[in-house]
Image (spheres, rainbow, N blue to C red):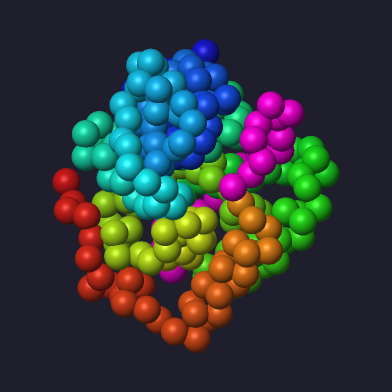
Amino acid sequence: MPRFSGIAVVIPAFNEEATLGQVVQEVLAYTDKVWVVDDGSTDGTRRVAGELPCRMLHHPGNRGKGVSLREGLGAALSADEPEAVITLDADAQHPPEAIPRLVQAFQAGSSHLVLGARLDDRDRMPRTRRVGNAFADFWIGRMAAGISIKDCQTGFRLYSAALLRQLPIEAVPGDGFELEGRLLVESARRGFRVVNTAIPAIYPETARPSHYRPLFDTLRIGTMVAASIFLRPRWGRPDAPRWPAR
């Protein structure tokens, strides 16, 4: 099994007591740079994370996935100085054994953002999610310089350190799921190479219901699409704030 010393992994978690331990243990087979961001969980998520050989950030209350990603990516980039940071969800829907696929795509293609697209066994994805994904893929692809997007809502991603140090992530709005769409669009618009790599679509029987709300969150993403088409917000300007270059 390959080990990736230059890769850090960030796992946002909200009420993931049942699956977090398994996910972290499987990720540790590939890297020891693992960060869990507990987003104000009310179950045993914080306790489980504290018993594992990983680093943890904790919110006293639920603040949203976007906030967790910002903090986790920033902490991993500053503390570990990695070549790239991978994000994946704590609900066991993203198989850690697919980590080498993302790393290979990053290393082989000079890519800056690799999307773990749920293309294998996609018929296992709930119909409402498939429809919402297709809508978002089309419009976000149009916004993102017309590139081909296969699963824009996937949380299983690899961000190169070069991208994270130049992208104004702290200024990009969105505290929920829509942040990932905004980061994708802004990466493509700034000329960073975005690629897809296939991963399985997994929906464990033991996992809790998804925090993603198909109607509400798809509408939020749609609102973001409309705003990005008709407006050019400050976070998209070249003079927007950036993390310090190293």
Q: Nearer the viewer, residue 125 or 113?
A: 125
Give the farthest residue toward the front. 42
Per the picture, the main secondary structure of the magenta-coloured stretch is loop
Based on the displayed image, in which of its 4 quarters is residue 190 positioned? bottom left
Could you tell me which residue is drawn at 72 percent across and 43 percent down?
A: 119
* Nearer to the camera, 13 or 4: 13
Q: Position of residue 231 (x, y in %)?
A: 44, 84
Residue 187 image point, x, y percent:
42, 60
Residue under the point 52% across and 13% down: 1
- The percent coordinates of residue 148 (x first, y second) are 63, 60
Q: Is residue 218 magenta?
A: no
Q: For residue 6, which quarter of the picture?
A: top left
Magenta segment boundaries in residue numbering:
188-211
Q: Quadrant of residue 39?
A: top left
Q: From the viewer's perspective, tell me whether residue 19 is left or right of residue 60.
A: right
Q: Residue furthest top?
A: 1
